[in-house]
Amino acid sequence: MILDTKMERETIYGQVVSKANNYEVGNNKHGGRYIIKSEAIRAYERSFIEQCQIYKDRLINCHFTLYVAVYESSVRYDLDNALKTILDCLQMARAITDDNLCRNIVVEKRVDKFQPRIVYAIEPHERNLFY
């Protein structure tokens, strides 16, 4: 497994919700339309932030490598769609300051029908510069 390292690993339980197919269109009072995240995305983000304990509030603000094993509930899920959600959740949990600082991603897709989850670790490339 890619996470057989000495880095701190964290597990977040639940099926990662793809942002690619989970937006809804709403209508505002002026007749305009807007796009919002689906409730499924918002629920996963809340769950991720609640479960995130090891990396929460670390504010990693340097280039980093993300190591992640994604355990999907089915082979039909696309791995690339999960990565955007994971990076956004890490930023929302304040584990990282900006997902554009990610320079490498080492990822595995696995299937666990009964317990979908992610197991991840973040390896900063240098010390935090400002925090």
Image: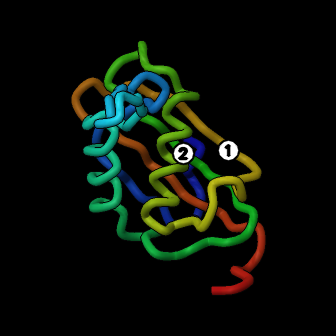
Name, please, the residue furthest toward the left. Answer: 114
The reply to whether callout 1 and callout 2 are in contact (CB within 8 Å) is yes
- Disc 1 is placed on an element classified as strand
Mark 1, residue position: 105
Residue 3 visible in image: yes
In-image side of 53 versus 82 (left or right): left
Q: Residue at x 59, y 60 (%)?
A: 122
In-image side of 1 versus 32 (left or right): right
Q: Nearer the viewer, residue 42 or 95?
A: 42
Q: Residue at x 76, y 52 (%)?
A: 103
Q: Nearer the viewer, residue 14 or 114?
A: 14
Q: Quadrant of residue 106?
A: top right
Mark 2, residue position: 68
Q: Tell me the amino acid under the disc marked 2.
A: Val
Name, please, the residue furthest toward the bottom. Answer: 131
Q: Residue at x 72, y 58 (%)?
A: 101
Rendering coords of residue 41 (x, y %): 34, 38
Count residues near mark 2 (Cα–Cα under 10 Å), then give few for <14, some for 14-19, many for 20+: many
Rendering coords of residue 19 (x, y %): 45, 32
Q: Quadrant of residue 131?
A: bottom right
Compute the Cα span from label 1 to label 2.
Answer: 8 Å
Q: Residue at x 32, y 30 (%)?
A: 26
Which quadrant is home to the N terminus? top right
